[in-house]
Image: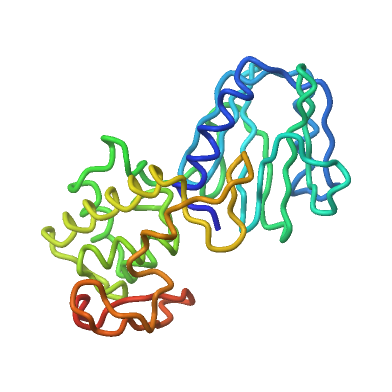
Amino acid sequence: MPELPEVESIRRQLKPLLVGRYVTESNSHPSDKFIAAREIVGLGFEAVLRRGKYLLFILDNGSEMIIHLGMTGQLIPGLDLSDPHLRAWWKLDNDVILGYRDVRRFGRIRIYSSGEYEGTLKNLGPEPLSDDFTVDQFYDSLKRSNRKIKTQLLSQLPVAGVGNIYADEACFHAGIYPGVRKLTRAKTAELHHSIRKVLSRAVENGGTTLRDYVNVDGEQGNNQHYLVCYGRDGEPCINCGEELRRTIIDGRGTTFCRSCQRR
């Protein structure tokens, strides 16, 4: 699933293509997941923002179109409308067609009045690369729950945008076993720093492509070449040389080092 770095890379590419343009035609798959795409004909794009793993398209009537890419969602200018995995498309006033392609159909499109969100989007924690994400806030949020640290990160409540890849990477860099339930304030500060570090680097590298992710230009990210923990089970730890192990934490595959991330 695209996480913050992948969604941010897409946002940065879409912004110059969409801002100042308006929609002249649109259509979608009849599923309730995608049919909202049809509602913005005649509306213009004022901004393209991101919140956690969600893309926010700010429209000139005060509403927002929200897209969650799910597992395999892709936004592609010039996408062939005969593509069997096309789920929605928008034609702009310059005749460019932006297509939403989603093989597994786990993504979704919604229209909200500005800021009046529901569900996960409404309850997201702070943006990890913003000044709102502080060690004190992070520590207070984590200590209120008895769930495992990785599970808390994936919940999007203590911080937004971190998924399976970057949770494993951040815990590794902080020397924290992802299955622990409580952290000291010092360890929380280390995890805070690692989250910002791994996400910033991944944004700079254009995101991580392991299977489906490509950016707006159809290009893969480069961050997969810089992962030091996620998906590397069976390989030696870069710090101590011990073989990295894989386990399941609350249903999610997790890679860690038994020596550097003691339980």
Question: Residue 49 vs residue 30: left or right?
Answer: left
Percent across and percent down for residue 125 are 38, 46
Compared to 49, does 191 lie above or below? below
Give how far across and how far down residue 183 sits, in percent: 19, 66
Circle count: 0
- Quadrant for the N terminus, please: bottom right
The x and y percentages for residue 198 are 32, 53
User: Which residue shows up at 49% across the image and 36% down it?
Assistant: 50
The residue at 67%/40% (across/down) is 110
Is 50 situated left or right of 233 in this image? right
- Specify the farthest residue to the right: 82
Q: Position of residue 60 (x, y in %)?
A: 64, 16
Give 26 or 144, whichever is nearer the viewer: 26
Q: The C terminus appears in which quarter of the rendering?
A: bottom left
Q: Quadrant of residue 40?
A: top right
Rendered position, 168 above or below 66:
below
